Image (tube, grey):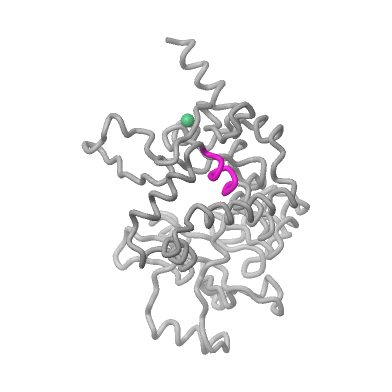
Amino acid sequence: MGTAPTFLNNFKRGYAVRIKPNEYFSENGQVATDFPKTLTLGRNAFVYFKTIPDWDKFGHFCKTTSRKDWDEVVELYTKSSTVPNDEQWAGQYCLFIPNTTPKRISHICGTANNSEYLESLRNKYGLRTIPEQTGLGNFDYDYASESEIKKIKYQLSYMIFKVSGMKDYLINVFNSTSKEDLAIGIQRAINTGKVLEYIDKVFGHVEKYCQENALLNFESLSEIRAWDKESGQPICPLCLKGLTPDKFFEVSAQDEGREEEDNTQAEIVLMHIRGLRPGELNHHTYNLGWGHKHCNTIQGAYDIKDTILLLRDIITNQ
Ligand SMILES: [Zn+2]
C-alpha cells in the first residue's frame, strides 16, 4: 500500500491496486481513515473478496445507499491503444469465493459463462463484446514489458541450445514424434533429410538476435550462476550442476506414492536468481536461468543467495 508512484510508473499499461476488504472498510463500513487518497476504486484500485468471513463482514457495505452504483470488476477491453488504461476496466469490487454455495466469482476471475450476465454487461457498458478477462490479473512482480519478454525468451532459448547433446536430442525428438504434431518447417526438414540444418538455422537466428541485443554476456550469466564459462553451458543456479537435454522434455508427475527415486529432478524449470516479490520487477534478462524443479522448490520465493545461506544454516545445525 505504501508503494511509491515512481515504481508504479513502470507499468506501461497502467496498474490497479488490489485491496483487502479490511484495508478499505472500517468496522462500520466507512472508508478506513488510513486508506491512501491517491487510490480511487474503479480507476486504479479495487476491493478483492476471497473469503467467506470477509464477505459476511464487509460484503453488504458494497451495496449501501451511497454505494448503489458499485459494480463487480470487469475488463472492457483486452488491449486498446485508444482507450486510456484506467478506462479499460470498470468496477469497484471483485469476488473470488469458490468454497461457498452458490460460488461467488466475478466474471474477471474467469468462470462466468452466464450469457444473461454477459448481455447485461454489454448493455451497461455499450460494448458489442465483453473481451477475455486477461490483463488486470497479472501481479506486479510478474510484469515485464513486451520487448523485455522477447529478450528473455531469446536468452533462455540460446541457453537451451547450448546444453550438451541438445541438437542430437532434438533430432531424435523430431524423428520419433508423429509428423502431424510437428511444425510445418520441421516436417519439411524431415522430408528432405535436413533436420540438423533446420536446427542450426533456428539456432543461428537465436544467436544473432542475442548478439544484437547484448544477451550473451557470459561473464554476467556466470555471475548470476546460470552459466558455466568453462564448458559453455547453462547450469542450475542453485546446485550448479549441468543440465541434460532429456530433463527439458520429461514432464513426469511426481505425486505422492508414485515417485520414482531416480526421477526426482526430472523437470527443468525457469528459476529467478533474485526472487519475484511485490515492489520489484525481477522478471528480466540476466536474472533468469534453467534449473532443476527440485532446486526451484527448495528456493521457493527466496533469492538464490539467501537460499544458499539458509541451506548452510540447516547443514551447520546438524
Ligand atoms: Zn539444481
Judge by depth and name the residue closer to the eye, 48 or 178.
Answer: 178
Could you tell me residue 214's position as x and y percent?
Answer: 74, 46
Q: Is residue 19 visible?
A: yes
The structure residue drawn at horizontal position 52% and vertical position 43%, both measured from the top left corner, is 270
Magenta residues span 156-163
Looking at the image, which residue sits at the far left? 257
Spot the residue most to the front.
192
Residue 63 percent coordinates (x, y): 50, 72
Q: Is residue 263 magenta?
A: no
Q: Quadrant of the C terminus?
A: top left
Residue 151 against residue 74 in the figure, above or below: above
Of 98 and 284, nearer the camera is: 284
Q: Quadrant of residue 111?
A: bottom left
Residue 119 locus on image (x, y percent): 45, 87
In this figure, what is the number of numbered marks?
0
Seen from the viewer's position, the closer of residues 136 and 237 is 237
Is 172 placed left or right of 58 in the picture? Answer: left
- Above or below, 186 against 259 in this view is below
Question: How far across and down, in percent of the image, does residue 48 sit?
Answer: 51, 60
**Above or below: residue 151 compared with residue 291:** below
Query: In this orientation, does residue 27 appear?
Result: no
Left or right, residue 3 beside residue 62:
right
Observer-nearest residue: 164 or 14? Answer: 164
Q: Residue at x 69, y 47 (%)?
A: 2
What residue lies at 53% left-to-right and 55% top-to-bottom? 197
Question: What main secondary structure does the magenta stretch of the protein show?
Answer: helix
Looking at the image, the residue that sits furthest to the right is: 6
Residue 159 among magenta residues: yes
